[in-house]
Image (cartoon, coloured by chain):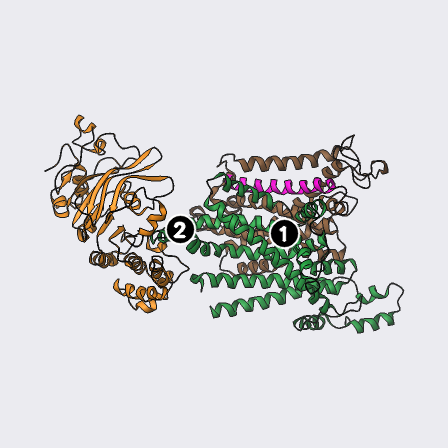
Chain colours: A orange, B brown, C green
Amino acid sequence: MLTVDGLTVDGLGVRAGDTELVREVSFSIGPGERVGLIGESGSGKSLTALSLMGLLPEGVTATGRATLAGRDLIGVPESRLKRLRGRDLSMVFQEPMTALNPLMRVGAQVAEVMTLHGRGRREARARAVELLERVRLPEPEQLARAYPHQLSGGQRQRVMLAIALANEPALLICDEPTTALDVTVQKRMLDLIAEVAPALLFITHDLAVVAAVCERVLVMYGGRVVESGPIREVFTRPRHRYTEGLLAASRLTPRGTRLPTISGSVPAAGHFPGGCVFGNRCPHADALCETVPALTGEGHAHACRHPAG
Amino acid sequence: MRGLAMRGRLNAGLVAGGALVAVVVLAALVSFVWTPYDPTLVDAAAKLHEPGGGHLLGADKFGRDTLSQLMVGARTTLYVGIVAVGIAALLGTPLGVLAGMTPRGWLSELVMRVNDLVFAFPALLLAVMLGAVYGAGTLTAMIAIGVATVPAFARVARAATLQVMVTDYVLAARAAGRRGGAVALRHVLPNISSVLIVQASVSFAIAILAEAALSFLGFGTRPPTPSWGRMLQESQELLFSTPRLALWPGLAVALAVLGFNLLGDGLRDFLDPKLRRIRADG
Amino acid sequence: MTLYLVRRLAVLVASTAVAGVVVFAFMALLPGDPAEIALGVNATPEAVAELRAQFGTDRPPVTQFLDWFGGLAQGDFGTSYVTSAPIGPQISDRLGVTAVLVLGGMAVALAVAVPLGTYAAVHHRDPLGAALSALSQVGIAVPAFLAGILLVFVFAVRAQVLPSGGYVPLAEDPGEWLRSLLLPWLSLGLVQGAVLTRYVRSAVLDVLREDYLRTARAKGRGRTGALWRHGLRNASVPVVTVLGLQLATLLIGAVVVERVFVIPGLGDLLLNGVAGRDLLLVQGVVMVLVAAVLLINFVVDVAYHLLDPRLR
């Protein structure tokens, strides 16, 4: 963990009462680095992001340690966290249609994040228009005076991006930012995110998307990071059996249309097996897998007793 | 009766509301065969009798027994409520169903406009108008409350019908060539019945409030027939000396209204949690 | 928005006219001949005819209606058949009293419902939040006049700090004016506040689940700040609709509360009119109250459209 400037996460855990939802997640993101976090729904990827933002739902708590540019993010009082949110780290959510306040003009919503963190009202207004331009929205002056319902989903997501970028944060977190968008709009949005993000934590279940945006990837399953490494390596030579299955399922086999899928289904939260979280669905699992495998390896790491390749 | 299937579980509101309503109904029923005293009996010896000694809750300035009056007053309250809600349901439901089945027709538009107009005439104004012209009494009160409640039923019935009309079985029935009337009787009414029952309970509570207010103003049940609202009105001048005369009828009104409100909310949860969304305000 | 305003205004005018027809048909056409009533059974036909001509009731109903309704627009409500006094000034004298009563009641209701409903929503899991919900359920069951009697008992009979009734005009003594209106305001407002609390609670609960509240927190607002800045205005959209219904209810509730507290408002005038068989007076007051309900609905509809840009 050498990076002091970027994000460092060490032994992050998230729990709701007695149920552990995320366990021992450790990773770091350097300045300018774009990291993908992939996994199926229920893998804990969104909770990981929300715990970094300090926006976990009521009754859900985070443990462990996470720092951004040396500042603690976990176990810090809300009064301190809220000064970081929107300034040092910011987030774009999945659903653009509902993420903006329907009664407030778009420009005011962008300006708000700046006035909240100490900028003057007039300056914030002017800069809001600049930001709308920066996220490639047409006629930003006019658009700033529009209400969210007058914008398309793609445009609203760009507004969310403008809000996220407004205070030049050190880290941008995107949680499935293009899932709700039309395919044609997705590509341009992804290119834009890749271009403007300072340092990026990009959450998705879509392998193609992560390959298009990120340099490095973390694969989550059952609340744990099971594999991590440079995109190219992880995607061409997966080591963990789960990653292997995930990649196989996403690829069309050359000869036919039949997709090899991972057998069984993702267990409910708190019902993952005790050892390797993938143990009950893995064709290679044996007695060794009853104990938790550690995430090992420099650069390209995996947590599997019977790695592929 | 699909709408009345036992979908939910008993909930606290349903039980508490049902119990309060049961007490009122029981008091009214028992009053037909027995009351401690004749509720209209003027007895100089029992004038402002303190509670106890035969007069369990005391007596008023004419020596009339408070408990007996309350019991017969429950009868009046339920009588007015049943007739008023009956009028509202019988007029409002067909109008609402009709409007809901032909959402774009002129009929629907007309029904809703008339609805809006009736809404501008609250029960009290109707009762005052009726009373001014024909002389006030139980009948004018019931009609006024009933007519004023029609819009609530029509609105709820229309909203529920609109939902039923797009369900698969109604579309199938219509595709099979069933006439509107048959669809209304076989599919729409059974399916909106639970919404209507909930509305009836809520409207009943409002009718009790209205009846009490009208009797209080002298536009309701005429003396000597006992009524909670008039007991309250008569108690007002003695508020300084004998506040209990206001306490008992006041408590009766509040508990009866609370009972029907809780019953309505409880029924809503019991019959179908989805119903929470469709409910006329007021 | 302009188009909507014009259309909605047309609806207001049309429904007021139709309501006028209803009130007129009911009050002026149905009952007996006011001239005969005024003169009694022993009057000569000539005297009755003369009085009819004087009242104008010998003209065709349509002419009578147009005359009456046209007069309303200029504040001319006609002359009482019973007291021979012009009705317009009586109504305008009392309209202000009732308006102050209703608006004060509404202010009390809002002052009660907005904080309590918001608290109950934010803390809906806590015992206190649940208790508030239950308490509002009880409040709904108490009619305004009963609340009035209760308040009189507590503040006038027991504590003896406020008058049990009567009204002092503002111009006469502002302090006494306020004291004479406090209990009536509370009677109207507390009960409506209880009803409103439930609506505020459910509106705030709905808003609390909204994504834009999370967005606001992601911008760096705290829980309270996000709710305050982004939640309450959104929650107010559904509440405003209820508010309109409530204002109408309050207006009618004021009629009863005026009787409890002996306040010379429109309700008092209306009931006196009925007692004195002054049908034209009753007709006028009923028309004013009905028009007020329609006007309130109009204002609420417009406010609704102003609040929500999606409807503009």
Q: CA distance from mark 2 to mark 1?
A: 34 Å
**Three-letter amino acid code at the position of disc 2:** Glu
Q: Amino acid at mark 1?
A: Leu
For the residue carrying disc 1, how many other residues have a C-alpha within 10 Å: few (<14), some (14-19), or many (20+)? Answer: many
Apparent side of residue C62 relative to residue C306 in the rendered image (left or right): right
Looking at the rendered structure, the secondary structure element under dot 2 is loop
Q: Residue furthest top?
A: A287
Q: Do dots 2 and 1 share one subunit?
A: yes
- Asked where in the image residue A250 lies, by quadrant, the reply is top left
User: Where are the magenta residues, as a range?
Assistant: B241-269
Instruction: Tell me residue A32's x, y (percent).
Output: 18, 54
The one nearer the camera, A59 or C72, is A59
Front position in the image: C272 or A169: A169
Queried whether the magenta region covers residue A174, the answer comes back as no
The answer to whether residue B177 is visible is no
* In the image, farthest residue toward the left: A309
Please give the label number shown on residue C210: 2
Q: Which residue is mark 1?
A: C186
**Does residue B259 show up magenta in the picture?**
yes
